[in-house]
Amino acid sequence: MDKILVLLHTEPDGTLGRAAMESLGVAASLGAYEIAISGAGSAAAAGKVGAALCVQGDEFAVPRSSTDAAAAEALVRASAATLVLAPGTSRWSRALPMAAARLNGVIDTHIVGLETGPETAGDSIQLKRWFYRQRIEGTVARTRRPWIVLIEPGAFPAVDGPVARTPVETRVVVVEATPRTTVLGTVSESAGEQTIRPDAELLFVAGAGWTKKQKDGQVHIADAAERIQSFVHKAKCSLGSSKSLVDQAGEGEAILPFLTHLHQVGQTGSTPRHKKGLATCCHGEEPHVVGWRFINERRAVNLDASCGWARGKADVLYVADAFEVMRELNALLD
Amino acid sequence: MPYQIIVCGGLAPDPLQTLEPVMGAGGPALKNEMMLPAVFDPWAAHALFEAAHLAKQHAGSTIRVITLAPKAKLQQVMMTVAQKLPFELIPIDGPGGGFTDAVEVSEVLAATISGIAGLDKSQLLLFGGWESATRGAGCVIPMVAARLGIEDCFLAVDELKIEDGALVIKERVEGGLHQVSRCAGPPAALAWATGNLPEPANHPQTGMANMRAMMPALQRAKAAGLKGEGFAVTEARLPAQQRQTQIVKDKPAAEIARELLEWIKG
């Protein structure tokens, strides 16, 4: 039977994020587990969730490979865990593979499902993940330990409210670190436009059709930009785009200046998880299907009733001019 | 300061190909895998273009590309990639599909890099894609870095600038933001996202010069000998994704907008 450790990091404000609470939810479904925490304010967070171990210190407050990997390695060693569950945040995705290598262990990432056999919990764990950019789903099993498992954010329900656990005394694990990297902060590149906001209910995807000639034979970039930006602001949704639209910038074609590769969904972009998705002027099949794999309710607006992407993939396809529909929709949102 | 840049990158099926998994005795594979047209992995390609850009700015820099893939297929792909920029290919013959173990692949890559004669870690920059278009695990470069004793690793990198010998790096993090870090210098590992560089134009002379060295390297390629011990992909299948799409035609835009608003707010 595996000894399970939930390895968490705090957010910059010292709280535990949603992804951390989802990992706790997964652990609770497996049976007994310990918690270990690193990051800013880790001691306080450890007290709140009954963590057995934590790493403290200013060096460990910011996301950085050298310090995070050292902290994670020390916490796993201190716990002697054989199965480590952790949220697949950018911070742990960077550091935990390094920790796995140093522990001579193994790691699996982007886990969206977890099954245990009828035997003792932990002995027959099988993990579900996607291969080939969300085009093939598969199941993975391992016998080598320690086994670090990065849980894909949004794939599991989070535990609600405070975690009810027997209070334990938190042991502070001392880790020496002399980082060569200084974290200077974060910047937003997209001129005030949000890209993929995990907390938004709706993902709005703009396709290349927005930059093509319209009924009057002219291209209407300014109108397209105004309608898209206006909708994103009013609906407070995530903004995604197709690869073809983003790539146009490098091909010398008319572009929507606020779209970057960070907005791209699909095989070479992100695969966001939102409750609802609205695609406009998108064409083509597989890239969009892949990008929309985890969108529950999908609607599309475009002029092609036989669009290969929309048929069989969207719940509703409105065969209409997206310029007109979005103008009306923006007016209703005022 | 010259850099010794090592780019790790594999092959991926052409993104426009339909992929179908088949289960065999040794686990899953893609149907007609060896027949599928392949490309150099998109993110590794970005890393390679960034390496070329950096090497151009720093005289004396070298670029080596380490690829674990079936060598016959690798030779085909290199006919195109070799035309982009000058580099040395270090091929490893082995399965390059998505169902191999990222941990084992990282061990093979790290061992190969450690065996390179004349490698100076004080100049070493380990590049690669942040994920592959096959396995998509996003953990190979950090594991290779750890096995090589590199502590500074950056994931989903979009920009690298050299400022007074220091590496100033932008990494993608949650919420559409970039984290900006300043690393004192090599050795460092950078797993690239898309970056900002366009694909270099083909240069046939560079391709011919590259291929003169690549062909013997491909013939000498060592077998990776991936055993997959303690690792199994027990199931692989296409997702059931067909939906009953309701096609709405001839409806006024205002009415569609009202319907969409109800749906968004519902």
Image (cartoon, grey):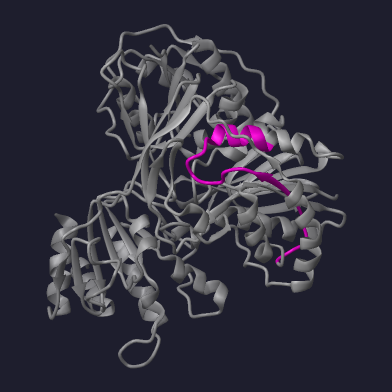
Taking depth in this image into account, of A290 and B184 the one nearest to the observer is A290
Residue at coordinates 32% horizontally, 49% vertically from top-left? B238
As drawn, A35 above or below A68 = above
As drawn, B175 above or below A207 = above
Taking depth in this image into account, of B16 and A66 the one nearest to the observer is B16
Residue at coordinates 85% horizontally, 50% vertically from top-left? B2
Residue at coordinates 48% horizontally, 53% vertically from top-left? B33
The image quadrant of residue B17 is: bottom left
Residue A271 x, y percent position in the rendering: 39, 51
Residue B113 x, y percent position in the rendering: 74, 38
User: Can residue A276 be found in the magenta stretch?
Assistant: no
Quarter the N terminus of chain A occupies: top left
Image: magenta residue range: B84-109
Task: Please give left or right for residue B97 compared with residue A121 in the image.
Answer: right
Is residue A64 in view?
no
As drawn, A17 above or below A232 = above
User: Can residue B88 be found in the magenta stretch?
Assistant: yes
Task: Please give left or right for residue A148 compared with residue B78 in the image.
Answer: left
Is residue B248 in view?
yes
Residue at coordinates 32% horizontally, 30% vertically from top-left? A114
